[in-house]
Image (cartoon, rainbow, N blue to C red):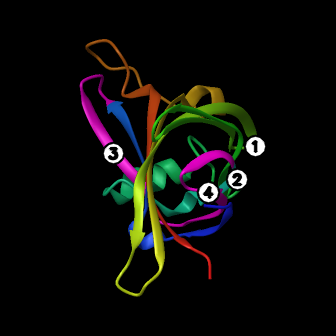
Amino acid sequence: MAKVAWNVDPSHSTIGFSVKHMMFTTVRGHFRKFSATVVADPEDLTTAEIDFTVDVASIDTRDENRDNHLRGADFFDVEKYPHMTFKATKIVKTGPNTYDMTGDLTIRDVTKPVTFHVTYEGMGKNPWGQEVAGFTAQAKINRKDFGLTWNAALETGGVLVSDEVKIELEIEATKAQ
């Protein structure tokens, strides 16, 4: 298949994350609003052009107080930095349906290279005759690298929020008409 434009379907896609809370439990969340530009041959992503923009204020961890804290100056500071972006710069095939996609992740105007481990999950036609492709991707970042440094020491030792953040994407994209 040739390289073509794809529309990421936000109603069938997720940009999620997880962090350790109190050193021994996991809190998960996701961003409800995002957009992407994808031009690719889904069966060979090595030449793909991929850009994501996330509306950071759309964060949802199922706790409004925590979400408001994450939107504030201690974390994302959405008033100053309303978007998080990712632009792929290099994609290397690592197996039959797997790739390492490295790109520039920008959070709070700090840009660092991050590598996502991507799996092409397959392609088919939906009930309306449109070509649809599926992908999953995972990466780990240190939130402090992006200026997200707030934390609280625990009485028993350790900290409230881990530095490591796991990012997990489930993407469904429809071939542009």
Label 1–label 2 contact, CB within 8 A: yes
Q: Which residue is mark 4?
A: 41
Badge 2 crowding class, 10 Å Cα cut-off, few under 14, some 14 to 19, many 20 or more, is some
Q: Residue at x 31, y 12 (%)?
A: 157
Q: Which residues are magenta?
A: 21-47
Residue in the foreground of this view, choosing between 51 and 111: 51
What distance separates the C-alpha of mark 4 from that of mark 3?
31 Å
Q: How many marks?
A: 4
**Circle on res. 28:** 3
Q: Is residue 163 magenta?
A: no
Residue in the foreground of this view, choosing between 105 and 2: 2
Q: Going from the N terminus, do you reach mark 4 or mark 3 first?
A: 3
Q: Which residue is mark 1?
A: 109
Residue 122 in view, yes or no: yes
Label 4–label 1 contact, CB within 8 A: no
Badge 1 crowding class, 10 Å Cα cut-off, few under 14, some 14 to 19, many 20 or more, is some
What distance separates the C-alpha of mark 1 from that of mark 3?
24 Å
Residue 17 percent location from the top left of the image: 42, 44
**Circle on res. 97:** none
Q: Which residue is mark 2?
A: 81
Q: Going from the N terminus, do you reach mark 2 or mark 3 first?
A: 3
Q: Going from the N terminus, do you reach mark 1 or mark 2 first?
A: 2
